[in-house]
Image: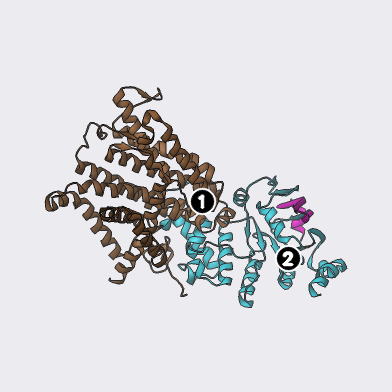
Chain colours: A cyan, B brown
Amino acid sequence: MSPIETSEPLLRVDGLTKRFGGITASDSISLDVGVGEIHAVIGPNGAGKTTLIGLLCGELRPAAGHVYFAGREITALSVSRRARLGLVRSFQIPSILPNLTVAENVALAVQTTLGRGYHFWADAGRNEALLQPARAAIAELALDGRRNVVAAALSHGEQRQLELAMVLATKPRLLLLDEPLAGMGAKESAFVAALLGRLKGRISMLLVEHDMEAVFALADRITVMVYGRVIAVGDAASIRANPEVQHAYLGEEQA
Amino acid sequence: MTDAVKPGLLGALAPAAEASPLSATRPVRRLLIAALVLLVALPPLFTYALGEPYLIALVSRMVILGLAAVSLDLVLGYGGLISFGHAAFFGVGGYAVAILAFHARHGDKFIGLIPSSSDMLVTLPAAVIAAALAAALIGALSLRTSGFPFVMITLALSQMVYFIFVSLKIYGGDDGMSMHGRNTLAGFSFADATTYYYLCLVLFLLFLFVCRRIVASRFGLVLRGCKDNERRVRSLGYPTYGYRLVAFTIAGAGAGLAGGLLANLDRFASPDMLHWQNSGNLMVMVILGGIGSLFGPALGAVLVISLETVLSRWTDHWMFYLGPILIAFVLFARRGLWGVIVDVADRNV
């Protein structure tokens, strides 16, 4: 993984801390994601993985620490500002626009790439700059046949695919994926895992996932969190071999 | 549940071109044309065929409140923002017209600064701008919240505006203020009810057209997205607050135009225009007519004013009968009267 180690990381997190009442959900977390890298974050339930994603996308404010993205500090930036810089997330439960069609969902995402400013007059439904990339993203996620279906009518797995199509349509630089394989059937799950594999190298990812097989197959590096703290960082082999990880994480899960 | 295939605004994405709701199906389009012809033909019909020309004022009122209801639908139906203060913008528009006319009659300036006028080329834009400013201010504050607090804050702020006008003794306070005749338009008189009706109709149609463009535009897509799932829209990169504020302001401007037209129709502006009951009334029109359809709320205005006129003829407690009708619509026709009509029209192709 030499290109990752030599270049300046795309995302750098430095001493990030978040407390909810007496619980320290993130305890001075430091990690980085290189350009093109898939960096997985694993850990037992309650380890603070979703909190970390919330801090990175800007929905949560840290008590201490800094976040740097593409060479600039973004700790104080809003969710939408960060997304426009290319830091886009998916949610644990697919977050879509239920009453809009699949096509409208994705077109809305494409629209973020067409620059800022309000456009009140021209019919969005005839805007090829919107429709063309939307069709492509829908095709990439194998939702071709569902383009004009209201998103609420999709199955859980399809909703996940739709959310990924939306997220990809924004042309992100770094994807924050919060359990993208959760709650999906074996076939859908394999489809999404294969897609992430195809995207590897093109788009950097911070991947929170419970499916260990997928994590070990996809991730360049893995960070292990327990009770809000990072206990290990390394590639798949070293994490598998790490006795502390086996005890704290794998041991606890199997217990 | 079946696949619920719906053409959607982006029907163009479909492999086989399907009609989108904004390019309505043929029977619905025919219906709309018929409605337009009827609206244009009403005054001569009343005057010559029925011999009851006073009805023109009633229909003018329907068209004006239809405009206000359409503007509310922009925030309520497409923005998902339950604004309970829409009447404030309506009233501000009405007062803008009446106040400018008042000063024009006295030959002085409004707050010693703004030249007064009784020409619609001045008064109606003034009504629109004043209402838009009020909406921008109230929206800027209330849109920092959402859900129930948003409802309450829009209600509270609009009631504040109401009490401001009640306390302005120079402009009639509680009693409101009368105008000595309608505004003119570049010297052209609107004393004739029929002429004025056509002016209202043209402005109503213009505003309806503008709203349909907005709803189908890129801006409209973001607005509808925010209604569905604001968090998702924000995390795609949209500063949703700005989008909602702009929509809220446009809607306020539309209500201001309607208020200015009503003040001219009645030659009267009063605090009642701003009262929260009037906000509720506009909401009833939107819900009865069909929320989120633009045509529906206009139809809702016709329905509510008709019911009010007919029911109040034989009972003072007409509201008592309106209530169950509203409940019936909410329970059995969630897409309102417009939804029912569209379904029937499409079935009888």
Asked if residue B125 is positioned above or below residue B34 in the image, the reply reads: above
Q: Residues within 10 Å of mark 1 (few under 14, many from 20)?
A: few
Label 2: which secondary element: loop
- Is there any visible trace of residue A38 in the rendered image? no
**Three-letter code for the amino acid on which mark 2 is drawn:** Ala
For this view, does B249 lie left or right of residue B307? right
Q: Which residues are magenta?
A: A1-28
Query: Residue at 38% across / 59% down in the picture?
Result: B323
Q: Which residue is mark 2?
A: A219
Query: Residue at 55% across / 66% down in the picture?
Result: A162
Q: Which residue is mark 1?
A: A114
- Front-most of A45 and A137? A45
Does the magenta segment cover residue B61?
A: no
Label 1: which secondary element: helix
Q: Position of residue B313 (x, y in %)?
A: 25, 53
Q: Position of residue B21 (x, y in %)?
A: 37, 62
Q: Position of residue A118 (x, y in %)?
A: 47, 46
- Front-most of B246 and A233? B246
Q: Position of residue A75 (x, y in %)?
A: 70, 47
